């Protein structure tokens, strides 16, 4: 836990939306009070906005007490420079929460395939954040939609009162994509595996 990955991409002229897609599977991660934030387009238009997958069942702005492994749009409204205080907003409910997910297997046993997922997420200069998640179907040997596109105009949300310190991962890069797992004592024996990462602009 706690490993972080930063993908740095330069915004092409005329582009207004950044996207990333990756496959993932987990071991002993469900219900561990930890999550993996995915933030795109650092600073500039959408500093610290994106989504996450993981356990948000204890959050008052989460997806409910039974959401032991879910997905959601979230972000931080921050100044241009890291180190200042931010206002945090987590958007919940049917407009943002995805469908439940489950841990896979460390190894594939006879007749059992690793339960894995594919996340697509994008952010735009119009302050929209969107994502969807596919689940791999071993029986069909293909990907099926688990959570269809969830989209939010981040300017329409209600921010939590008061200011919070920006998370340390916001200071890693000034433009690019961040994917990382939050540290949790409960998740010390857990693992998150991310593969087949692609990203770009349009």
Image (cartoon, grey):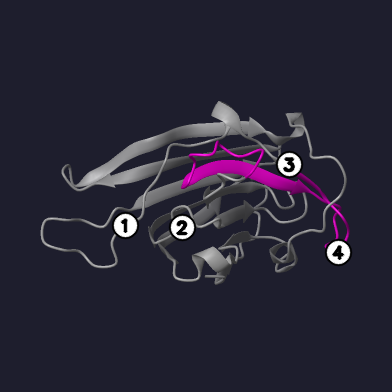
Q: Who comes first in sequence, dot 1 or dot 3?
A: 3
Whether 17 is drawn above or below 164: the answer is above
Mark 4 touches mark 2? (CB < 8 Å): no
Q: In whole angstroms, how far apart are the C-alphas of marks 4 and 1?
A: 38 Å
> Mark 2 highlights which residue?
198
Mark 2 surroundings within 10 Å by alpha-carbon count, few (fewer than 14), some (14 through 19), many (20 or more):
few
Left-right relation of 69 to 52: left
Q: Residue at x 52, y 70 (%)?
A: 1
Marks 1 and 3, how far apart at CA:
30 Å
Residues drawn in magenta: 59-88
Pointer 4 or 1: first along the chain:
4
- Mark 3 lies on residue: 89
Q: Gap in Å between the C-alphas at discs 1 and 2?
A: 22 Å
Depth order, front residue of 183/132:
183
Q: For residue 19, say whether it is visible.
A: no
Sequence-wise first label, 3 or 2: 3
Tell me the mark number nearer the camera, choosing from 3 and 4: 3
Q: Quadrant of residue 8?
A: bottom right
Mark number, residue 83: 4
* C-alpha span from label 3 to label 4: 18 Å
Residue 16 sits in quarter: top right
Residue wearing tag 1:
104
- Give the quarter of the image for residue 165: bottom right
Q: Position of residue 70 (x, y in %)?
A: 48, 44
Q: Earlier in the sequence, mark 1 or mark 2?
A: 1
| Closest to the observer, 157 or 160 | 160
């Amino acid at each position: 836990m706690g490993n972080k990955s930063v993908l740095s991409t330069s915004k092409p002229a005329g582009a207004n939306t950044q996207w990333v897609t990756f496959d993932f599977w987990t071991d002993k991660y469900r219900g561990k009070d930890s999550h993996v934030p995915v933030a795109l387009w650092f600073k500039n238009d959408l500093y610290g906005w994106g989504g996450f997958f993981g356990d948000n069942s204890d959050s008052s702005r989460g997806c409910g007490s039974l959401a032991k492994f879910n997905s959601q749009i979230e972000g931080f409204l921050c100044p241009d420079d890291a180190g200042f205080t931010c206002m945090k907003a987590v958007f919940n409910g049917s407009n943002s929460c995805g469908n439940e997910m489950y841990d896979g297997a460390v190894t594939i046993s006879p007749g059992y395939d690793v339960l894995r997922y594919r996340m697509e997420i994008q952010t735009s200069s119009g302050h929209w954040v969107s994502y969807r998640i596919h689940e791999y179907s071993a029986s069909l040997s293909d990907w099926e939609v688990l959570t269809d596109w969830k989209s939010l105009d981040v300017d329409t949300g209600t921010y939590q009162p008061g200011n919070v310190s920006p998370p340390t991962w916001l200071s890693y890069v000034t433009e690019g994509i961040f994917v990382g797992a939050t540290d949790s004592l409960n998740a010390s024996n857990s693992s998150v595996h991310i593969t087949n990462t692609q990203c770009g602009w349009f």
